[in-house]
Image (cartoon, rainbow, N blue to C red):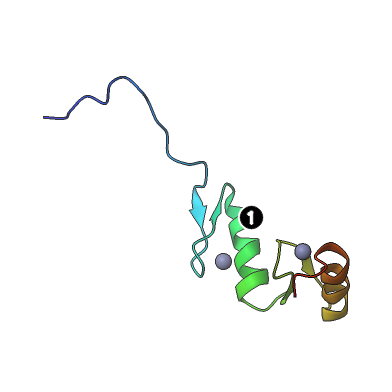
Amino acid sequence: MEPQQGGSNRRAPACNFSCAFCGKGFIRETQCEEHMRRRHLGENPHFCPHCEAEFATKKKRDAHVAAMHPGEE
Ligand SMILES: [Zn+2]
Ligand SMILES: [Zn+2]
């Protein structure tokens, strides 16, 4: 027997895909793959430690951190 859920049809969170490395959830598979490539597989290793921004070079990353996250380091 299956108990009734009181009529509320709660759906699962919108994140259908999750990163195999850190577990971060994504709505689209392409987003998940891109995240894993860039964040964990070294394709674009210069990412901001404070937000999701990613950069081609460490210099650009440092400039972003200084401008967008002053006093957080
Ligand atoms: Zn991840
Ligand atoms: Zn940032």
Looking at the picture, which amino acid does disc 1 mark? Answer: Gln
32 or 49, nearer to the observer: 49
Say which quarter of the image contains residue 33: bottom right
Q: In the structure shown, which secondary structural element does the residue marked by tag 1 occupy?
A: helix
In the image: residue 3, left or right of residue 12: left
6 or 15, nearer to the observer: 6
11 above or below 8?
below
Q: Residue at x 70, y 61 (%)?
A: 52
Q: Residue at x 22, y 24 (%)?
A: 4
Q: Residue at x 51, y 53 (%)?
A: 17
Which residue is outermost to the top?
A: 7
Q: Quadrant holding ligand 1?
A: bottom right
Could you tell me residue 60's position as x and y percent?
87, 74
In the image: residue 64, left or right of residue 34: right
53 above or below 14?
below
In the image: residue 57, left or right of residue 30: right
